[in-house]
Amino acid sequence: MFRFGLFRSKPCSRCGLEVNYLEPECPHCKGLSDLQVVFLKKSHRDDLRNKNSDLIAVFWKLTLVAFFITLLLFIF
């Protein structure tokens, strides 16, 4: 995963989300049980998957548009 804009952060060893390196505890998983942290990780992973699938759809559409424009340029 790319960490642009997170120069002063590190991944939490428990939940894996980014935490400011000055904070003593992770605000995401502080006070959660281990089972709740597992659900937090799964929820975060599912959110990333949904965002990425939308991005993949946009890239496929752009690829098809570029292909048809190129095809039209070669035909005419």
Image (cartoon, grey):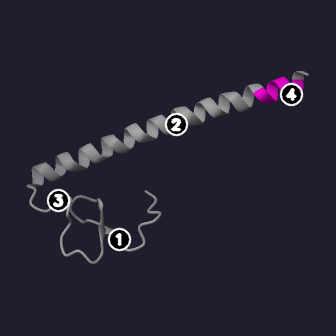
Whichever of labels 3 and 4 marks the residue nearer the N terminus, that label is 3
Task: Point out residue 50 in the picture as x, y percentages from the top left corner.
Answer: 38, 37
Q: Which mark is residue 56?
A: 2
Q: Which mark is residue 67?
A: none
Q: Quadrant of the C terminus?
A: top right
> What residue is disc 4 on?
73
Whichever of labels 2 and 1 marks the residue nearer the N terminus, that label is 1
Q: Relative to 3, is 59 above or below? A: above
Task: Point out residue 3 in the picture as x, y percentages from the top left corner.
Answer: 44, 62
Q: Is residue 44 magenta?
A: no
Q: Relative to 60, is 28 above or below? A: below
Q: Which mark is residue 29?
A: 3
Whichever of labels 2 and 3 marks the residue nearer the N terminus, that label is 3
Residue pictured at 20% horizontal, 66% vertical: 26
Distance CA(mark 2)–CA(mark 3): 30 Å
**Callout 2: helix, strand or loop?**
helix
The quarter of the displayed image where residue 66 is located: top right
Distance CA(mark 3)–CA(mark 4): 55 Å
| Kind of residue at badge 3 | Cys
Distance CA(mark 2)–CA(mark 1): 28 Å
> What residue is disc 1 on?
9
Distance CA(mark 4)–CA(mark 2): 26 Å
| Kind of residue at badge 4 | Leu
| Kind of residue at badge 1 | Ser
Residues tagged 1 and 3 counted as in contact (Cβ below 8 A)? no
Point out the stretch of residues depicted in magenta. Answer: 69-74
**Callout 3: helix, strand or loop?**
loop
